[in-house]
Image: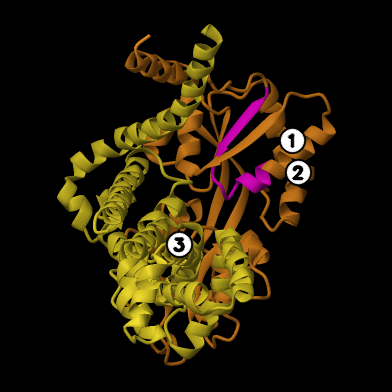
């Protein structure tokens, strides 16, 4: 009896260490970042247009916009592609082809982000510079690389959702005379909607959080981006770029950027949770 | 035990266990901290020193940036601070002493295909503030100038701001890269780019511009003609003792100075 309790106790300690580290990280980010947010003023911090820590100017608007542009671009590229693959493998593909495709897609998730960034820098960036103009290091390059990086998230979760649609739904639609495509478009996809939306939101979370690949291809300029061929900085890439040297107020401002990022991700995750639970 | 109490106790124990892990500081030995421009050279010298004095306590070289290094020397966190910029008056007032160990020049680089070979310091300044935005305005072809700068806090950027920008801010539209090497890679691949890097790592992939008619080379730096020269400093508080004194003497010896010259720096005479 005592042994039983002891094991339960030890296991719960182990389980709690995961939560404890989350709690400590959260506590630390807020302790470091909050004072500077108060000092600069939360509003000036969020919509300030100039980031120049050495001159005491901490405005992260260019980075917020950079994150939004790059993430939106990644979704524009990744969602249609990923959804098409998910529909193909779950509805159209011969089982052997689907069997071969699945591990290949999972492999895509296993490639380190620095490799994506490197390929982007060596192949994509010169291509954009030569054929579309601008410095090449641009929002477009970041969006394409991230669009590919979020494919595995979108494909695997959407595919699960599509497969989870009961067989009777399809049979019902087909027996009413709908074609295969009509069945998919009007019955299967609406039924799998919550799962598909969750996959998009998780992909979005991945895109916002990605750092290394983005630093390498977006150019990291601090101007307000005006076109997809402009260079930009994202919230994460700015932290990654500057943390090595940052001290004092500058370092705290990077943590405050972390708070903003934290809020973004929490919002997206709760949204994903809410959407998968509601609207069945 | 009620379930909630058990959970609470587990949570507290976990925090206590996490709290017990303390990082042990290094004892004995010598710690250098500061400029990441100086760091690779200091590491090389430390290795060489250890090789020649087997059994001496370890020499530990850390980065952190010039300002952090100077601060570390002041507070005693590091025995020797490393800086790639001159000390400010208020830093000198704290009783810190700079020891120049070498000189490094900053080269303004462009793509080899760029027809522009020479700029004045004033032109470089106006290019980096964003006043001059087309190569045509400085005698090149009709193409937009792509600025490449370093991230804030970098010693190379600090020295560039001090010697070239003289108080004007670098354009926010400039692309930022986080190392000398990354700046060189971008300039090597973009025909319209301009950047600045340490003279020691200029290679044939990029073209170093003549500045006010003076070529960027070890020779012109030695003759005192090239204007963008910054010191590499060791910063100490008080008189160096023991291992610190030995190591500084080694770094200033002709032998170590020759090693630095081989790596592209200009030695102290």
Q: Secondary structure at mark 1?
A: helix
Mark 3 neighbour class, 10 Å CA radius: few under 14, some 14 to 19, many 20 or more:
some
Task: Report which colour depicts chain B.
Answer: orange
Q: Is residue B173 visible?
A: no
Q: Residue at x 56, y 47 (%)?
A: B36
Q: CA distance from mark 3 to mark 1?
A: 66 Å
Is residue B34 one of those drawn in magenta?
A: yes
Residue at disc 3, secondary structure: helix
Give the numbered dot on residue B106: none
Relative depth, front residue between A200 and B181: A200
Image quadrant holding the C terminus of chain A, namely: bottom left
Residue A146 lies in the magenta-colored region: no
Give the residue at mark 2.
Answer: B256
The answer to which quarter of the image holds residue B138 is: bottom left
Q: Is residue B194 above or below residue B227?
A: below
Q: Nearer the viewer, residue A236 or A17?
A: A17
The lab-note entry on whether marks 1 and 2 share a chain reads yes
Cβ–Cβ under 8 Å for marks 1 and 2: yes
Side of A111 where A20 appears, left or right: left
Q: Where is mark 1, residue-wise?
A: B250
Which picture quadrant has residue B44? Answer: top right
C-alpha gap between disc 2 and disc 3: 64 Å
What residue sits 57% from the left and 50% below the top? Answer: B37
Give the spatial CA distance, label 1 vs label 2. Answer: 7 Å
Q: For the magenta stretch, what is the residue range?
A: B29-42
């Amino acid at each position: 009896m005592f042994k039983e309790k002891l094991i339960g106790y030890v296991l719960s300690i182990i389980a709690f260490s995961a939560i404890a580290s989350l709690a400590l990280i959260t506590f630390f980010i807020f302790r470091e970042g909050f004072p500077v947010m108060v000092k600069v003023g939360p509003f000036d911090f969020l919509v300030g247009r100039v980031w120049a820590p050495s001159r005491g100017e901490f405005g992260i608007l260019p980075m917020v916009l950079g994150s939004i542009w790059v993430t939106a671009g990644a979704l524009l590229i990744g969602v249609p592609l990923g959804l098409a693959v998910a529909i193909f493998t779950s509805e159209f593909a011969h089982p052997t082809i689907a069997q071969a495709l699945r591990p290949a897609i999972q492999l895509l998730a296993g490639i380190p982000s620095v490799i994506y960034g490197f390929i982007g820098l060596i192949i994509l960036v010169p291509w954009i510079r030569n054929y579309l103009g601008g410095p090449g290091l641009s929002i477009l390059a970041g969006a394409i690389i991230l669009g590919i990086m979020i494919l595995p998230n979108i494909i695997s979760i959407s595919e699960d959702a599509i497969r989870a649609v009961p067989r009777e739904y399809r049979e019902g639609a087909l027996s009413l005379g709908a074609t295969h495509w009509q069945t998919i478009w009007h019955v299967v996809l609406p039924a799998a909607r919550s799962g598909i939306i969750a996959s998009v939101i998780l992909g979005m979370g991945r895109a916002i959080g990605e750092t290394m690949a983005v630093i390498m291809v977006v150019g990291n300029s601090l101007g307000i981006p005006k076109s997809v061929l402009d260079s930009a900085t994202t919230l994460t890439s700015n932290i990654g770029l500057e943390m090595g040297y940052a001290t004092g107020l500058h370092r705290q401002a990077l943590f405050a950027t972390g708070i903003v990022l934290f809020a973004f991700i929490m919002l997206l995750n709760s949204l994903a949770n809410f959407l998968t639970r509601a609207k069945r | 035990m009620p379930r909630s109490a058990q959970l609470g106790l587990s949570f507290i124990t976990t925090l206590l266990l996490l709290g017990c892990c303390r990082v042990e500081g290094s004892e004995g030995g010598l710690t250098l901290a500061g400029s990441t421009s100086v760091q690779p050279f200091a590491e090389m010298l430390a290795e060489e020193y250890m090789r020649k004095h087997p059994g001496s306590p370890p020499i530990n070289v850390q980065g952190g940036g010039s300002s952090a290094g100077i601060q570390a020397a002041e507070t005693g966190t590091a025995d020797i601070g490393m800086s790639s910029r001159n000390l400010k008056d208020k830093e000198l007032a704290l009783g810190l002493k700079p020891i120049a160990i070498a000189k490094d020049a900053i080269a303004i680089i462009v793509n080899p295909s760029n027809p522009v070979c020479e700029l004045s310091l004033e032109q470089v300044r106006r290019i980096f503030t964003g006043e001059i935005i087309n190569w045509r305005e400085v005698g090149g072809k009709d193409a937009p100038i792509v600025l490449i700068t370093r991230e804030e806090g970098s010693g190379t950027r600090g020295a560039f701001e001090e010697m070239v920008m003289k108080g004007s801010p670098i354009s926010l539209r400039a692309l930022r890269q986080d190392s000398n090497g990354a700046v060189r890679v971008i300039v090597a691949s973009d025909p319209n780019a301009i950047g600045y890097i340490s003279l020691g790592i200029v290679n044939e992939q990029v073209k170093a511009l003549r500045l006010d008619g003076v070529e960027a080379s070890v020779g012109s730096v030695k003759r005192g003609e090239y204007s963008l020269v910054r010191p590499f400093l060791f910063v100490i508080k008080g008189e160096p003792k023991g291992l610190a004194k030995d190591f500084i003497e080694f770094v200033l010896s002709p032998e170590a100075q020759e090693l630095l010259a081989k790596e592209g720096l200009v030695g102290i005479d």
